[in-house]
């Protein structure tokens, strides 16, 4: 085996690991979004007049959580390049 082939194998391994890492990293934002909107549903059921305030807060936190997923996606493409 030449040094070039060993380096190419390492690159292929890096792409696979970055794919697994992004998959694991996407679990967190997925759970976070579920918890955010579960809390909104629960709060609206308890106090219906607060729905507009709860939804405003929910959308803001939803955006913050989704930014984490997008950062993970960007890091996946950087690692696999």
Image (cartoon, grey):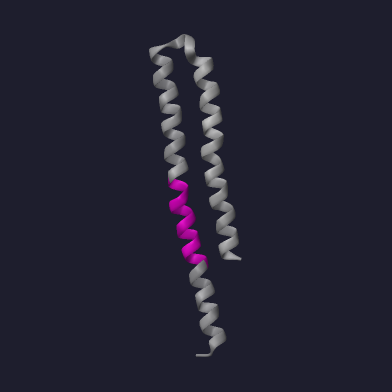
Residue at 48% x, 9% y is 49
Where residue 64 sits in the image (x, y, percent)?
A: 54, 37
- The correct choice, above or below, for 61 with respect to 76 in the image is above
Relative to 15, residue 73 above or below: above
**Is 46 inside the magenta-drawn segment?**
no
Q: Is residue 62 above or below residue 47?
A: below
Left or right for 22, reference 70 = left
In the image, is residue 22 part of the stretch drawn in magenta?
A: yes
Estimate the x, y position of residue 63 in percent, counting from the top left: 56, 35
Is the stretch drawn in magenta largely helix, strand or loop? helix
The image quarter containing residue 44 is top left
* Residue at figure coordinates x 49%, y 20% from the top left: 54
Q: Quadrant of the C terminus?
A: bottom right
Q: Residue at the spot x=46%, y=53% of the render? A: 23
Pinpoint residue 48: horizontal percent, then vertical percent.
45, 11
The part of the chain drawn in magenta is 15-27
> Is 59 placed above or below 26 here?
above
Residue 76 image point, x, y percent: 55, 58
Residue found farthest to the bottom: 1
Number of marks in the image?
A: 0
């Amino acid at each position: 085996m030449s040094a070039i082939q060993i380096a190419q194998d390492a690159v292929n391994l890096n792409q696979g690991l970055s794919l697994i890492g992004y998959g694991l990293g996407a679990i967190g934002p997925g759970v976070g979004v579920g918890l955010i909107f579960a809390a909104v549903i629960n709060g609206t059921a308890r106090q219906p007049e607060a729905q507009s305030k709860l939804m405003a807060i929910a959308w803001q936190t939803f955006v913050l959580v989704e930014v984490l997923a997008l950062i993970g996606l960007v890091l996946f493409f950087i690692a696999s390049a």
